[in-house]
Every structure is written in C-alpha cells, then in structure tokens.
C-alpha cells in the first residue's frame, strides 16, 4: 500500500473522488433529468471544485477532456467497466491498460472487483496485473469492491461489506471503495477489516441520489468511523448546483464540520 | 480522441465512409442483383469519387486492391468481422492486427462492438488492445457500435442507440458509427450522448437499400442533428449508378445542400 | 494476396497440390485398399511427378521425409488439422507454427477454416496470426475453406461454396481451396466471389475417389470456369498407378487439354 | 526440491509457518471472537516469536506490514487465494506474481492446488509457471495440497492425503502442506508418499481451533511420523495468548519435547 | 523426426523406457503391495540396470533424485500428466516447460495426447509448443498416444491404436508409445501406420502387472513386428525383483533373444 497523505488522490489523507463513468455503466438514462451533464465538460468543471481530490473517468473521456483540465483536476482512470446492456454474470471489461493510463496523465487508477461473481477469480487475476503495473508507475490503486453475483446471498450486510474491504487490503489495493453498510458501527467494522489505523483507506460509494441531509449524514458517519471519505457521482452531478453540495462535502470531509454546519454554509 | 478535421478519414470534419465488407459479413447474396460488384475493383473505382472520404474493407481486399488505388482512395481497414454462417451469440473475429493494417497503408481503422452480446466484454478488451495500438500509429478508430444479442430488448430504440454512441466515447473511439435512430431529435440525443460539440464524431450507418429520397432525408437529418456524416455500403454499390447517389450525398454532407437540391443536381 | 505466377506453389498460374494429410484427418482407414501408401515415401515419390506443383503434408511428415526430396518436391506445410477421433464441433488444432514451417523448408502454407462452426471465430483469429506471419516469410497461404458445423444448413450449395471462396479473399488467403460446387456455372460464381480476374486463386478439392473420367470432367470444368487447378489426395494416391492420373491431370491443368485427350494419353 | 535445512523457511529442518490469509479465504467471520486480530500488526507481532519460522500472508498484507518487520519475520507470500464468496468449483486466483513477491522481500512462496477440482489442471499449470519462476529466484515453494471438488469422494481419507503429498512431490514443490490424516500411522504413509527420508518436507495444516492438548497431540504425531512441522493460523491467533501456544509448539517442533512437557512449560 | 540410433533414449535403435510417473497418475494405490517403491530412489536404482535406456519421471521427481544418478541414468522428463482425482474429460496438465526440463538435465521428453478427448485439440496445440521447443534443444520427443474420451468407441482396437501411432508421426513425435494392440499382426499394422521402416519408432506401453511369460511374449511380438521396444512401469517396479525381469527384457529387446531363452537366463 502506498502512503496516500500527499498523493494526488487525497488531501491530508482525506478523499473526495468525483466519479463520472456512469455513461458507460448506466448509459443515457442517468442523464434524463439534466441532459447537459452528458457533456463531460460540465463534470470536469465541477471537478475543479477545491473539495474534489480526484475525478474518476473511463479512458475515452480522459483522452478527450483531461488535456484541457490537467492543471485543475487530478485524474483517476477507471481501468475496467461495462455497459448495463451486459446480461451475464457480473463482470467488467478491462478497457484501459495501466501503461496507457499513465501515458495520458493518470494520477491514480480504479478497478472493480465483483467478489462472489462467477468471474471473481478472473477479475482478481486481471487486478493482479493492473496492481503490479501500477506499482511500477507509482500510481495508487482504488478498488471498487462490490460483492455481487450468483454466489451472493446479501450484498449489503455489514459482514459482506467488511469482507469487500478486506479483499481490497489482501489483494493489494491502496483504497477500498465500498457501499455504505448502513451505520457508523458497521462502517467501523469495515474500516477495521481493512486493517484499521495502519491499514488501507476506505471510502464510501455515493450511490443513487438522495436528499442533501441524508447524504451528508452518511458521509459524516463514514468520517467518524475512521473512513477517509467518499467517491460520489450522481449525488453531485445529478444536482442542479454541484457547487453547493461540494461545498458541504468539503466541510464534512476536509474540515471535520458537522452536518448542520456544513448545510448552513 | 483525435482531431479529425484534417484527418484522411474526414474533410472539414465531414465523413463519408464507403463500406465494402459485405462479402464477409453477408456473403454473395448481397451481390445477387449486381454480380459484377463482387469484383472489389468496381467499388474501389466508386471510392475514387470526390465525396467519399474513406473506403472501409477487410484485410484481404485491402491487400489485393488498395495498391492500385493508394493515390486515389483513403483506406479504412476494418479490423474485425465475421461471416453470417456464424450462428453463435453476436461476435466478430479480429482478422487483422493494427500493426499489419498500418503496414499495408491504412489511414484509419474500424472495429465492431456488440454491446449487450454475451461477447461484449471480450470484444471490449479486444477493442482496448486495438485502440491503444492505433494511438501508437496515430490512426483514427471508428467503432461500429451495434447493441445486439441476448441481453438486448430493443436495438433500435433511441436510448439504445444513444448508449451505443456513448460506449464509443467512453471506450476511446474517435468516431461512433450507429444505426439511424429514426428522427432528427433522437439523433440529436445520440450526438449529445457522444459528448456533444467537443465529443467524438457520430456517423449514421447506411443500412439496406432504400429509395434515394428516403435515404437522403435520413442523411440530412443526421447532419442537421450535429452528426458528421455517413458510412454507407449497399445504398451506394447496390445501385446501378453509384456516382449519382454519391453526387447527392456529397452535396448533403460536404456542401450542406437540401435534399431537394441534392436530388435535382 | 501474393502474385502466384512464379511462386513455387503454381506453374504459370496453374496449381496441382497433392494433399497427403489424410493419415491425420482420416486415419488408417483411408489406406485399407493400398496399405503401402501409409509409407509417406510412396507419396513423396508421386509428388515428384512434373504435373504436381506442391505437396501438402503435416509437420511430422514434412520433418521426416522432405529432407530427401527437397530438390524434387515443393513443400506445402498444412498448419492445422485434427484426427477424426474428435467428436466436437468442427475445429482444427494448429499443429505447426509458421516460423517452424519456414525453418523446415516450407514453400507454402495451408490452413483450414470451418465457416459456420462454433469455432469459426477462434479459427479465423488463428488464421490471422498465421497469415500475418506468412507475409513476413513471403509464404503463400492456401485456405481450406470448408463451411461446416451446427450453424450450417447445406454445405454443398453453390452459394455456400462461393461464400467460402469469398471468406478466403476477405481474410487474406492467396488461394481458396473449396469443394466442387457441382457445375461449371456454379464454379464461375465461386471464382467471381473470390474477386474474379484479379482476385485470389481458387482450386477445387479432390474429395473421395471416383472414376478417372468423372474426376477429370470436374477438373476441366474448374479450369474452364476460371479456377486455377486442384488440390487432390485420394483420387491420386488411392489409385494403383498415380502416374497415369497425374499425367492426365497435368494435361488438363497445365496444357489445357480436353478430358478425352487427357484420357487417351 | 531445494535443501531446506538452512532455508529461511525452516530451522534445522523443522518448520512452523504462521498462516494469516484467512481475511481473504474466510473473511471477517474468523475474527468474530477477537476482532483486534483483523489488524495484521497483531499477527506480525506474534510471528516474531522465536518458534515461528515463517509468516504466510497475501500480497497486500505483505506490502503494507512486512516493511516494519523485515528484520524479525521471515516472509512467505501466498501466491494464490480466493474469498469464500466464490461459489464455483474450488479454484484460487493467482493474486501475486513470483517476480513481485521477490521484489517485496519474500523468503518463500505458497500455492494452493485443489486436486480433483474441475480446475485442477488449470491450477497445476499455474503452479508450473510459479514453480519455475521460484527456481529462478531460489525461493522455496510450499504447496497447500488440498484435494477438493466434484471429482472427490472423501477428502480426509489417508490415501487421499497421501496422494496430495505425492502430487506436491511430483509437481516440484519443496514442502507439502496437507490436512492431518488422523493418526501417526496415516501420517507416516503420507510422509512416505512424499518420498520419505530424501523426499520433500511435509507439514500439517492447523485447521480450526481445538484445545491445546488435542492440537499438540496431533503436532507431536506429525513430528514422530517424520513430518517437518506445522502451518497454523487459527489455532494460534484465535487464542487470547498466542505466545503460550507458540512456546508449546516450539518445544514440540524444535526441541522434540513431549506434549506433557510442552504443556507444563 | 530425430535419428534415434545414437540418442540417449535408445541403444542401437532399441528402447526400454522405465516409466515412473504413477505416483502422479495413479497415486499411492499403485504402491500398496510394495510400499518401499514410493521412494523414488528404489526406482532410480532399478533404472541403472544396463537394459534400461531411459527413465521417465515428472519434474519434481527429476529435480529431487536425478542429481545423484546423472552418470548412471538417462533422464526422460514427462512434460504433462494429471492425478486420477481428475474427473473431467481426459486431459493432462503441462507440468514442466521444455526449457526447464532441459535445465535440469533431460535427455528426452514425453507428452501425452488423448486423441478423441474433448481436449484433444488443446492438447495437440500444447504438444506443438513443446515439440518445437524440443527441436531447439535437440531433445527427442516421445508421445504417449492414447485415444481416450467421449468421442471414442473402442480404444483398444487395432485401427485405433494404429491411428494413435499415425497421429504421433503426423504431429512430429520421434517415438510413439501405444497400447499393445493384441497381436503381432496388429502391431505390424501400427508400425506401418507410423511410417514403416523410415518412420518414427513405436514402443509398447507396459500396462498393469501380468506374468513374466505373458509380458515377455507381448514384448517379443512387438520386436518381431518392427517395433523398437517398450515403456514399462508396473511390470518392473511392482515386482519384488526388478533385476530379473529387466535381465529378461534386455535379452528380448537388445539381444533378440526368444522368450524361452530370456526366461531361462
């Protein structure tokens, strides 16, 4: 695991990844309410917000738009991903090599692992290759660790999410991105499973859009539980005003503000 | 994504790809009415028409006929493709390496992705290798983005076609070749899904032969919707006189003519 | 496609390949009537006949017997092939690399493609690798193009055989070896599908043993239809006197003799 | 096979591997009673005990924690492993390359083979690559040889365990880690199957937690049967006081003490 | 095919391979009657007998025991093999690379092909790689050619065994190891199928233990049929006194003695 304190992925150990790979993973339906957000420039703009420590996109979006933002945005290239036209067991195509990601300026890398899928073993081996290549380039690796598939009874239980965080630690990720397990206590268990104080970083995955307060409460619980922050997409760019929620998230994640204080800003 | 304005694939940002891989994809039945068009020379001749910005063929046809036309034709080598004798889930054999395509003079490359096929993930990974090798050779990459296969409910809906265009953007294609979604409005949605003004180019796929007017109306709608042009096969070389329809297509695509004006030329 | 006029595979553009891979493809049963023909020397001897332009064998037979015949026989190494003990979908193991074939003295290469098999796509990708490596060694490539497998309704129709010839052209073979489609007219269609006058060469596959006259009539029809000749095994070496039929084939293929004239020699 | 007498994996030919890959293989449930043991530091501390000759962990745990213990702990990197979310036939993802394991300081390597699984052949071939690379780095290779899967009638019979030890010998492991076959006599048979006196080392796998006396009795029987020691996880770090059981194990394994003597220490 | 007369695998063209890979292929049950034979040294000792021209073992046994016998034993490394815990279609893991076999001192190589198995094509392609690498190292290649699997009606018929020998010739083996087809006449057919006088060598596979006389009668019939000898395991090392049967085998194989003469020695 790499020391992330001064990495371009974090600031003082705190992480706010703005995720924008939904065009591939979910398709145009995620943009129904705000069609202008199909234009990647609108989200690169949002990512220039001071609270954002990294912007996660697929290769093609990085190639096309990052060159205009390389001074203002820290780039996380998501190495794998798949459209939801796919109807097979959960799986994710490796769309970008580590070498190419490094060439186009990646500051960090992302990789999905579907633990419990019939493709888990193949994905873990693809992760191995990516992780070891990432080490050669000194690029931190974030694992989207999402238990999912036929072998899985319940993918939102605290133990499953803690297991997901542990897999990220054992397999050599630097950051585990996991679903929120529902409570601060469960999140503490997850952080411990990732190795605790000297373990890897754990960030919560933003999920589908909810109210500002509900969302900030979860993020605050993650921080209080020893988590390092958040990777968020829809809860930012599906809002009319991304700046407002990013201000609040910055207060909670980077300044340790309470939810009330963050909301009243 | 590569700037295509001055690429050999486009002229002033407008694209008219003449596609001639039907001998592989459909077999001799596409030539029943005009058997002489089985001779690739007849279509290379057509491709010397000024309106055509690129000719798309498979490796073997490129090897055999391009050497006589290298001064007059811009060559797009289609990297994958499969006969319709194939009865499995939609898939496409990679018949040509990028290195070899470059060696035989390719100015651009083409690659089919069947989103929603059980082979989508394997095809996306083959695309990755081709796309990254294409970057090394500065060759623009056109994705034939055709959702198709068991995971697919409706492959001609506007949302599915917009998703196809988005996949091309996210995965790193320079041009998305998609089915016409049926209306200018739907085409606008597709162009937006591909990133909009600063996104990748979108061209309509010609499809099976229709009347001149019906065909030109669709092409005009594509141009009006912000599309970059057309990739067309049967609607050109299944006509007795390819020059006539190419004249009209050139007027609509390169000169912005109305369909009536184009037809009356 | 390579110019074959002066290639070791052809003479003045005409081709007579003596094929002897039946020991692998069919096993000992093909030698029941003439067991001495199991000894490869007997067929290498036959291949020294002036009418034969190439002898097609698998790697092991080439390794063992070609060294004694390298001055008198032009060697075609068949790169893939499988025993008929195999009961799966039509497929063919790649038994020899192009590099090794070149090392042991191959003048030409052969490769089977089963269009319509569930293995068609994998075989086409293996063919790609072989074809591109063959180009590096300037070795002409003959495709045994045999539609066969679960996706196939009728593998002897004229259209299917024409499609087979077309696949060979599109994928980059120099010669298509196809079944005889039953008539000169159907053969003309097949030759046209392979590109016509400037297309690739088409040779008829000899098939199981028939009478001299019936066999020569088919060969004559192939030549008259614009085909380049024949690849024949059993109709030569299952005969007591291979010289006699090779004399007649030489007359029809290389001298343009009529069947009557060829038979009366 | 490598001479292990002076290897960092053994001391005077005796082996006590402390295994700590349960976070990956079993998940958080193995830590229910002592949650603090989820923190790898607690087990690295235990591994500094003089009786321990090697600590077995997955790549990510090695990367994160070994740097602080490299003077006090001998590192065995387990190359493959899989979460128990996996519901397919027994299999194990190769999570770490030999080259990378060597780079991060491994003194020895571990690899699981599930004989009788439908994945046995694929795993054996992965083992081949790892074993031959290990030879290049002079790293001893421990095979976790666990017959398991659909082809298996009884995975705890003496003959199956002896077969597992034999597979380790035949395939080129230096140490076979097998289940305890239930008696000293069965263990002798297993040691003989691994080649006997000049064969490879055999160590017993610790299994789930049992009483001190029961556990030590088995270990003593292994030593008396000619085994080389033990690889143990839960029976050490699921105990409140790992030092106590490690003292006793050290007495039995390294000093040849009786179980009574070891317990009374 | 390599000239074997002076190869370390043969003596004056005659071959007696002592095979000892049963620990992997059959497991401990083959050693029930003589457990001491689980110790590879006992069989290496037997292999120092003058009649033995080669000892066939798996990689791990070669690594561990050959160094002490390299002056007295000619080593054949069996490259593939699988435990009988495997319940899938007949298949064989490639456990050793040719490069590594050469490094540890192999004088010859062995490879199993299960013709008719659903894995035949994959195995033939693995054989290709091994055979071509073997040529680089000038190592003779023995094919264990055993038709077996779902596609097979009768694996002991003379025609099937002749086919097996032919596959070995066609695919480039130097020696075919086949089951005894039941009679001298059938064996002659098999030898002819392997190319006859100038073809590859054919040796009989020893099979399970039978009486001295029955066994020697079969071996004599093989020699009289033009075969080159024998590969034998259980019929040697499952006997209390391997020297006695090796004396007799040496007389029949190397000196052309009758069975009676060989038995009375």
Image (cartoon, coloured by chain):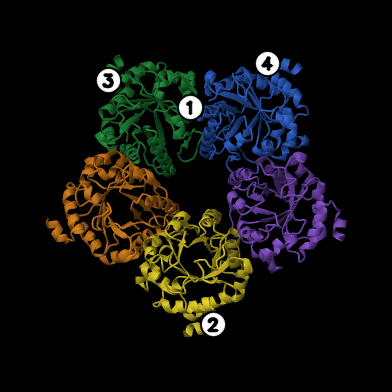
Chain colours: A yellow, B orange, C green, D purple, E blue
Residue denoted by label 1: C23
Q: Which percent across, then down, holds residue E50? A: 71, 22
Left or right placement of residue E259 versus residue D98 in this view: right
Q: CA distance from mark 1 to mark 2?
A: 81 Å
Label 3: which secondary element: loop
Q: Is residue C225 visible?
A: yes
Q: CA distance from mark 4 to mark 3?
A: 57 Å
Q: Looking at this view, is B200 or B41 the one in front?
A: B200
Residue denoted by label 4: E255
Q: Which percent across, then down, holds residue C233? A: 40, 25
Disc assigned to residue C255: 3
Q: Looking at this view, is E62 or B56 the one in front?
A: E62
Label 1: which secondary element: helix
Label 2: which secondary element: loop
Number of the front mark, 4 or 1 = 4
Q: Quadrant of residue B27?
A: top left
Q: CA distance from mark 1 to mark 3?
A: 31 Å
Residue denoted by label 2: A258
Residue at position x 22%, y 54% from top? B210
Where the N terminus of chain A falls, by quadrant?
A: bottom right
Q: Are marks 1 and 3 on the same chain?
A: yes
């Amino acid at each position: 695991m790499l020391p992330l304190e001064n990495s371009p992925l974090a600031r003082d150990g705190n992480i706010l990844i703005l995720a924008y790979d939904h065009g591939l993973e979910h398709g145009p339906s995620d943009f129904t309410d705000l069609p202008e957000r199909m234009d990647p420039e609108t989200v690169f703009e949002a990512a220039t917000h001071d609270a954002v420590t990294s912007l996660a996109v697929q290769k093609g979006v990085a190639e096309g738009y990052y060159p205009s933002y390389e001074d203002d945005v820290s780039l996380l290239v998501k190495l794998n991903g798949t459209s939801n036209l796919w109807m097979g067991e959960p799986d994710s195509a490796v769309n970008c090599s580590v070498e190419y990601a490094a060439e186009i300026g990646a500051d960090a890398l992302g990789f999905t692992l579907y633990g419990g899928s019939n493709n888990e073993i193949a994905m873990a081996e693809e992760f191995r290759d990516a992780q070891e290549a990432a080490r050669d380039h000194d690029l931190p690796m974030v694992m989207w660790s999402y238990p999912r598939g036929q072998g899985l009874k319940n993918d939102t239980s605290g133990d499953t999410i803690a297991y997901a965080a542990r897999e990220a630690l054992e397999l050599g990720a630097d950051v585990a991105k996991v679903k929120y397990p529902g409570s601060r206590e469960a999140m503490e268990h997850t952080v411990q499973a990732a190795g605790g104080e000297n373990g890897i970083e754990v960030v919560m995955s933003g999920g589908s859009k909810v109210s500002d307060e509900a969302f900030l409460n979860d993020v605050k619980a993650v921080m209080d539980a020893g988590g390092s922050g958040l990777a968020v997409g829809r809860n930012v760019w599906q809002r009319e005003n991304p700046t407002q929620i990013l201000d609040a998230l910055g207060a909670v994640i980077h300044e340790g503000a309470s939810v009330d204080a963050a909301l009243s800003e």
